[in-house]
Amino acid sequence: MKIRVGIVGYGNIGRAVEKICAGDRDFEIVGIFSRRDKQALHSPFCSEFFAQNEIFDERFEGKIDIAILCVGSAFDLEDTAVKIATRFCTLDCFDTHARMSEYLKTIDTANKMCGTLSFVGMGWDPGVFSLERALLSAVMPQSQPQTFWGKGVSQGHSEAIRKIDGVKYATQYTVPKPEAVESAMRGETELSAREKHERICFVVPGYAKYYGRCDVSEEEREDLRQRISTAIKSMPNYFADYDTTVNFVSEEEYLAKHTQAYHAGKVIAVEKDMKCGCGKVFCTGEKYGDNPPCKAGKVKNSAEFRLELDSNPDFTAQVMTAYAKANYRMWKEGETGAKTILDVPVRYLFQGDSLQFV
Amino acid sequence: MKIRVGIVGYGNIGRAVEKICAGDRDFEIVGIFSRRDKQALHSPFCSEFFAQNEIFDERFEGKIDIAILCVGSAFDLEDTAVKIATRFCTLDCFDTHARMSEYLKTIDTANKMCGTLSFVGMGWDPGVFSLERALLSAVMPQSQPQTFWGKGVSQGHSEAIRKIDGVKYATQYTVPKPEAVESAMRGETELSAREKHERICFVVPGYAKYYGRCDVSEEEREDLRQRISTAIKSMPNYFADYDTTVNFVSEEEYLAKHTQAYHAGKVIAVEKDMKCGCGKVFCTGEKYGDNPPCKAGKVKNSAEFRLELDSNPDFTAQVMTAYAKANYRMWKEGETGAKTILDVPVRYLFQGDSLQFV
């Protein structure tokens, strides 16, 4: 039986999710629910478009197994998600780390009232990287896993800029600071957000649309650029805690240079200078002879998980659709509530006994 | 409440598990169950020793929450594990990949009959690497994750050699072939076990013990070396499918050079030349413009999970004890049967709400 999918939102991620669902015989696309003008939308897979609120129509009751939420997370997702979770199982890649636990609770309440199952934060970070951080901190209890993003385009941060009034196009590059990566590799963990990354933004202002006329003076243009720059740099969670550079470029330059979707990231965990809880006898790194000398402090165990993605939205959509299958399987077994990737056994990503343990 | 642990076996891993349990207030060591002569055993943590079979004594009934099985897996573990799983929850790092599914079934039957929960194959490979392979193959469905081990000492393979009659000491180094690693990084997946690794063994024969006398002729020595070499190279699963080199060294050289416990490994997943299931329209790596050109075949997504361990037994014991806690929590919730790392949500590695999702 196919998993009947409603895709909510039709930006980069929505289109990537559609592409995967259209090519995977486990899925059937019921429709794409978007707030954009239907006439302006085109699906290469002949998916049917509906207004976003039409998902609450009676005709979809019991007809959608999971709503995959692909709306920009910064401003739109929270309200949309809670409403939809009262009707359908949902999956999203909500990425405001600082609001995560509150968001989870809100969704969970909706789920529990209505018998639905929601998977939250199912991208690569949060998502796959969350799983890696948790796993490594458990099996390397004397480490503190460090995360680095980039160099690459953050869809969430770019989207957050695009929501600012007066912005026509925007791309945000997250760049890890090399000295911070080296420090983490040595097992040092005292790095602030600001010390680890910088955020570099390329923005095309939409002067005419903002002022509602074509004859915009240079003074007005400068004023809009200042507003946008201030709005970006003061945005909590997204930019306020980072060294942020805002570059204004022409539409031509933007379209030529800043429309790619690559990204990268790594999680690093290092245990060193292991605390020796046992006097002078059994320490990590000893030779396990009959009377081994104490070698605490001389050994190092390190782990690294690394992603390099030519297409961030495609990879995010791959994570989302893989976990959409898991959502369906867990829901069929009677699970309800809001879950994260930490709550889902990897086994559920596979059909029945198709996964051999090796 | 403390988790009451019985440690079965007192080799490298048993001692590493003891060290962690002794230093972690969540655990209480009930005893160490070993087949070795009690008089010859010494615990730096004053753990009490018992004969291995004493674990079935009435006095331990209901007194052990989990038996952590640290007996050499190649020959001893299977029988021991099944018997103990009829009485207690168990956890092991069984590592004979080829026999895994049969082993799982046997343990599961014992568990289901007796209401116990067993975690099987909970080391770093199988174990952590199994989780990475499964996760990556699900979220990168067009990749085939490749695993490389080494350079480093394989405890399981060294142990397998030590079980051969006439072997006094033995260490096996697993060495990945550099050209194979490069090939995997390029996304090529058609590599056999033999093409990926070589196995290099350093062995000290115990001539006097083997022949039961001190005056062993050079001819007899050569004969024993031949027997050992043949026994190693023909050992199924462990050595038969690999280029294996056996070096015989003196006891002095062995103790000076080959008693370390470092290991390393990596799982590599690469998606490239992505199949374009959608004609010329939406392909991975496209720029998501209005009329994006097809770029199938030009993009690459890659993931790598890497471990570098100064002490393999210590890290293995860290994985085992982390999952021993998960076993206790799942069992308290009524779970029974044989599970692998793929069946256990990472959430269970943490107490209650101590794990924030980020």
Image (tube, coloured by chain):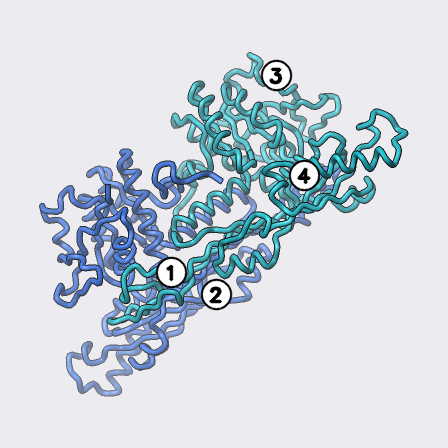
Chain colours: A blue, B cyan
Q: Which of marks 4 and 3 is nearer the N terminus?
A: 3
The residue singled out by tag 4 in the image is B158
The residue singled out by tag 3 in the image is B54
Same chain, labels 2 and 3: no
Q: Which of marks 4 and 1 is nearer the N terminus?
A: 4
Q: Mark 3: which amino acid?
A: Glu
Q: How far apart are marks 4 and 1 (CA)?
A: 41 Å
Same chain, labels 4 and 3: yes
Q: Mark 1: which amino acid?
A: Met
Q: Which mark is residue B307?
A: none
Q: Earlier in the sequence, mark 1 or mark 3?
A: 3
SS for dot 3:
helix
Pointer 1 local density, CA inside 10 Å: few below 14, some 14–19, many at least 20: some
Q: Are marks 2 and 3 in contact (CB under 8 Å)?
A: no
The residue singled out by tag 1 in the image is B274
Q: Which of marks 4 and 2 is in front?
A: 4
Q: Distance between the residues labelled 2 and 3?
A: 56 Å
Residue B117 left/right relative to A161: right
